[in-house]
Image (cartoon, grey):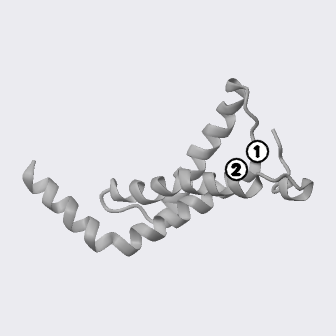
Amino acid sequence: MNMTPFMDVLLGRRDFFRQVLLNVIMTAPFGFLYPMTRKPAAGLGRTLFFCFLMSLCIEFLQPLFNRNSDVTDMFTNLIGGRIGYGIFVIFRPVTGRILRCLQKES
């Protein structure tokens, strides 16, 4: 496991930006959907805590599948969770109405 954050940048690896982008894209939906499924909606701290736990589990499981774990992935996963939560806050009025309509129908 690589415990040095952003070592890929220091080593000049070319796929660093792609890896960061993919990690952010992977966890942004979690940051959006997690607070939406909680009543009342989860706050930023709780959402990032569970995003961290999810990321930690992923990083611990990766060696079982012959993949490398990297602490940078955890940072970028948290950034993705934060971005997803920001999108949730922006669209909260819309998602709230949709969820209320779905609850009335069931």
* Residue positioned 39% across, 55% down in the render: 33
Sort mark 1 into few (<14), some (14-19) or many (20+) by Cα contacts within 10 Å: some
Label 1, label 2: how far apart the Cα atoms are: 5 Å
Amino acid type at circle 1 is Asp
- To which quarter of the image does residue 94 belong? bottom left
Left/right placement of residue 19 relative to residue 43 reads: right
Across and down, in percent, residue 12 comes to 89, 56
Q: Give SS at disc 2.
A: helix
Q: Of all residues shown, which one is farthest toward the left?
A: 105
Q: Which mark is residue 73?
A: 2
Point out which mark residue 70 bears.
Answer: 1
What residue appears at the point 49 percent right and 66 percent down from the top-left corner?
44
Classify 10 Å Cα crowding around label 2: few (below 14), some (14-19), many (20 and above).
many
Asked if the residue under mark 2 is in contact with the one under mark 1, i.e. CB atoms within 8 Å, the reply is: yes
Q: Which mark is residue 78?
A: none
Q: Is residue 68 above or below residue 19?
A: above
Q: Residue furthest front?
A: 14
Q: The disc labelled 2 sits on which kind of residue? A: Asp
- Which one is in front, 57 or 95? 95
Q: Residue furthest right?
A: 11
Q: Please, what secondary structure does the residue beneath circle 1 have? A: loop
Residue 105 at what x, y percent from top left? 8, 52
Q: Quadrant of the N terminus?
A: top right
Percent across and percent down for residue 64 are 69, 24
How many marks do you count on the picture? 2
Q: Residue at x 44, y 65 (%)?
A: 43
Q: Position of residue 82 (x, y in %)?
A: 54, 65
